[in-house]
Image (spheres, helix red, strand yellow):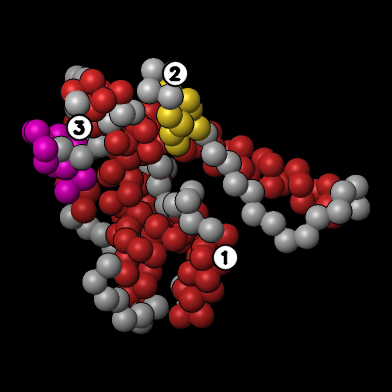
Amino acid sequence: MTDGGTKAEEKVPNSKVARVLREYDLSGFDEELVHRWTAEGEERRSLRQLSDDVNRELVRVAMENAGMTILDGDVPNTYRLLTDDDVSAGMRTEAETTLQREGVDVERLRSDFVSHQAVHTYLTKRRGAESPDTPSDEESVERGAETIRRLRSRTAAVSEKTLRTLRDTDRISLGSFDVLVDVRLFCEDCGKQYDAVELIESGGCDCGNDEEA
């Protein structure tokens, strides 16, 4: 590491990304993160993609350390079941139970997952990597979708906590439940409704297609 990198490292001694890379024995992956973030064109990965890359590696190591047999697709699917907002509570619980039965500390694993903000701090302040001047179109789209996902997840979490408190204190009658939060929009031009995140990720509504037709 260069002197600049060493000085940057001293400024962020408690970097979460650095800690999990060390504790999960992912030496060398730090260089890969820098390369993926600063690459040109289509090879460049956004901060959100990089945080997912790190977290999938944590899942892989945790499963390997537990002696689990890992088939193709097991790691990304397990990570999706643990983190995706669209996964039902039942499917998530089933995935957690399977991991726990195999000896994986699910709570520790989940607490070790890193955010894209943590990756940004690690890359810029600990590794001294230069932030790209402007976000790519893909990264801007992802940021918009991620903002809505987080708001949706937060709304669901607060709603679930409130409902459980009211139920558990006998203020309302309520059985087992899942909280579903949709953020939908209505386009006045094409007259159709869309899920907001799906709309962003698909590049927009059908208005443009209708005009071309």
Callout 1: SS: helix
Residue 151 position, x and y percent, is: 53, 33
Residue 172 position, x and y percent, is: 87, 49
Mark 2 and mark 1 lie on one chain; the one further toward the N terminus is: 1
2 or 3: mark nearer the eye: 2
Magenta stretch, residue numbers: 32-43
For residue 90, the mark is 1
In the image: residue 63, left or right of residue 180 = left
Q: Is 27 above or below relative to 141?
A: below
Mark 3 and mark 1 lie on one chain; the one further toward the N terminus is: 1
The residue under the point 22% across, 48% down is 30
Q: Does any portion of residue 213 appear in the rendered image?
A: yes
Question: In which image quadrant can residue 13 be found?
Answer: top left
Is residue 40 part of the magenta span, yes or no?
yes
Query: Dividing the image into 4 quarters, which one contains the N terminus?
Result: top left
Q: Residues within 10 Å of mark 3 (few under 14, many from 20)?
A: some
For residue 129, the mark is 3
Q: Amino acid at mark 2?
A: Glu
Residue 211 position, x and y percent, is: 23, 20
Label 2 vs label 3: CA separation? 44 Å
Q: Amino acid at mark 3?
A: Ala
Callout 3: SS: loop
Label 2 vs label 1: CA separation? 37 Å
Mark 2 and mark 3 lie on one chain; the one further toward the N terminus is: 3
Residue situated in front as seen by the camera: 186 or 148: 186
Residue situated in front as seen by the camera: 168 or 180: 180
Q: Return the residue at label 2.
A: 188
3 or 1: mark nearer the eye: 1
Q: Amino acid at mark 1?
A: Gly
